[in-house]
Amino acid sequence: QVRIHILDSSTGDITESDVMLARTSSAAILGFNVKKSPIALNLAKKDKVDIQVFSVIYELFDYVKKGASKLLPVTRERRKLGKMKILKIFKTSRGEMIAGGSVISGLVRKGAIAVVLRGLDESVVGEGKIAQLQQNKSVAAEVEKGKECGIMFSGALRLKEGDTLEIFEEVEVRKELN
C-alpha cells in the first residue's frame, strides 16, 4: 500500500547535517525526545524542511500513520440518499426534462445522481443528474420523504410518468492504515 523510507536513524539532537539530508531528499525530520539545534532550526526554516519532535512515542506513530494515509488512493463511492416517484412530466428538451414527483424515501438533493428504475420489476434503464430542485415553486437544496417537488433532470434518457428515481451522492473515500 504505502512504503516509508527511513533515510537515517541515529541518537542525539537534530543537527544541520540532518536538515541538509532531508532537504536533498525532500523528506521530513521526525525526532523522539530530542532537541533541535538553533542552527538546524534556522536552516530548516530557510529550506522549508519539516521538523517534528515528539515526547510521546504513540504521537509519533500517529503522525506517521496519518501522513502515510494521505498517500493512499482515493476511491469514489455512491451513497444512497432516497427514492422519488415521477408523477408528471412538464417539459422535455434535448438532454433535460422538467418533472414533478413525490419523495417516497430518504431525500432528494440538488446535484445528486438519479438512477432511473422502470416497470414493476424496477429494472435500471439509465441515469442522469438532478440539475435543479424546487419545492412549492421555490428553489430547494433538498426535499425530504413525504413531500412533492419539481426537478430538472439532466441526462440522455427520457423519463416517463411512473418511473422511480433512486437518488445517490458520490463521495470520496480515503482508506486508512490500521
Image (cartoon, rainbow, N blue to C red):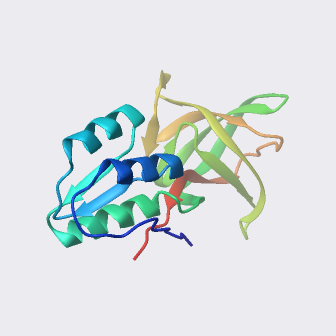
In this rendering, the answer to whether 91 lies above or below 24 is: above
Nearest the viewer among 76 and 162 is 76
Nearest the viewer among 37 and 80 is 37
User: Left or right: where does residue 85 sit relative to residue 142?
Assistant: right
Residue 22, percent across and down? 44, 52
- State the residue at coordinates (28%, 44%): 40
Q: Which quadrant of the rendered structure holds the C terminus?
A: bottom left
- Residue at the top extreme? 138
- State the residue at coordinates (36%, 54%): 18
Residue 34, percent across and down? 18, 61
Nearest the viewer among 39 and 35 is 39
Residue 75, percent across and down? 59, 60
**Disc count in the image?**
0
Q: Which quadrant of the rendered structure holds the N terminus?
A: bottom right
User: Left or right: where does residue 35 sit relative to residue 172?
Assistant: left
Q: Is there any visible trace of residue 145 in the rendered image?
A: no
Nearest the viewer among 130 and 150 is 130
In this rendering, the answer to whether 26 lies above or below 140 is: below
User: Left or right: where does residue 55 sit relative to residue 144?
Assistant: left
In terms of image quadrants, where is residue 115? bottom right
User: Left or right: where does residue 16 sit relative to residue 54?
Assistant: right
In this rendering, the answer to whether 162 lies above or below 111 is: below
- State the residue at coordinates (81%, 42%): 158
Q: Is there any visible trace of residue 48 in the rendered image?
A: yes
Residue 62, percent across and down? 29, 66
